Amino acid sequence: MWQETDQHLYRAFKFADFREAFAFMTKVALTAEKMDHHPTWSNTYNKVEIWLNTHSAGNTVTDKDRALAEAVDQLYTSS
């Protein structure tokens, strides 16, 4: 579940191994590029952490972030 603050949406995702985590990141990257909205994220072995906010809106959470979060959730459920 995404955690929301005034400045970002955050969620951590866990996978069986690095390969699955990286495959998920690849899917997210392609989706983010299509939406022209790119996450701040990190990956350590089987864990992917994502932070979303809109830089052009003063680094706050906007509808663009919520839309990308929803798309990421759909990718996670289907992986």
Image (cartoon, rainbow, N blue to C red):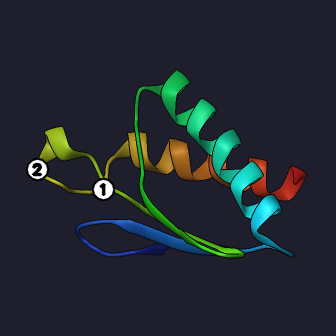
Q: Could you tell me which residue is drawn at 23 percent across and 67 percent down?
A: 7
Q: Could you tell me which residue is drawn at 84 percent across and 57 percent down?
A: 77
> In this view of the protein, which residue sits in the foreground, 17 or 40?
17
Quadrant in the rendering for residue 2: bottom right
From where the camera sits, is residue 9 visible?
A: yes
Q: Position of residue 72 (x, y in %)?
A: 65, 50
Quadrant in the rendering for residue 22: bottom right
- For the C terminus, give its image quadrant: bottom right
Quadrant in the rendering for residue 46: bottom right
Give the secondary structure at mark 1: loop
> In this view of the protein, which residue sits in the foreground, 66 or 76?
76
Q: Which residue is mark 1?
A: 61
- Location of residue 28 with respect to 5 vertically, above or below: above
Q: Residues within 10 Å of mark 1 (few under 14, many from 20)?
A: some
Residue type indicated by callout 2? Gly
- Location of residue 12 with respect to 25 vertically, above or below: below
Task: Decide if residue 75 is on the left or right side of residue 59.
Answer: right
- For the N terminus, give its image quadrant: bottom right
Q: Which residue is mark 2?
A: 58
Residue type indicated by callout 1? Val
Q: Could you tell me which residue is drawn at 16 percent across and 38 percent down?
A: 56
Q: Position of residue 58 (x, y in %)?
A: 11, 50
- Location of residue 44 with respect to 50 vertically, above or below: below
Question: What whole-number distance in Å separates the C-alpha atoms at marks 2 and 1?
Answer: 9 Å
Q: Residues within 10 Å of mark 2 (few under 14, many from 20)?
A: few
Task: Decide if residue 41 is on the left or right side of residue 79.
Answer: left
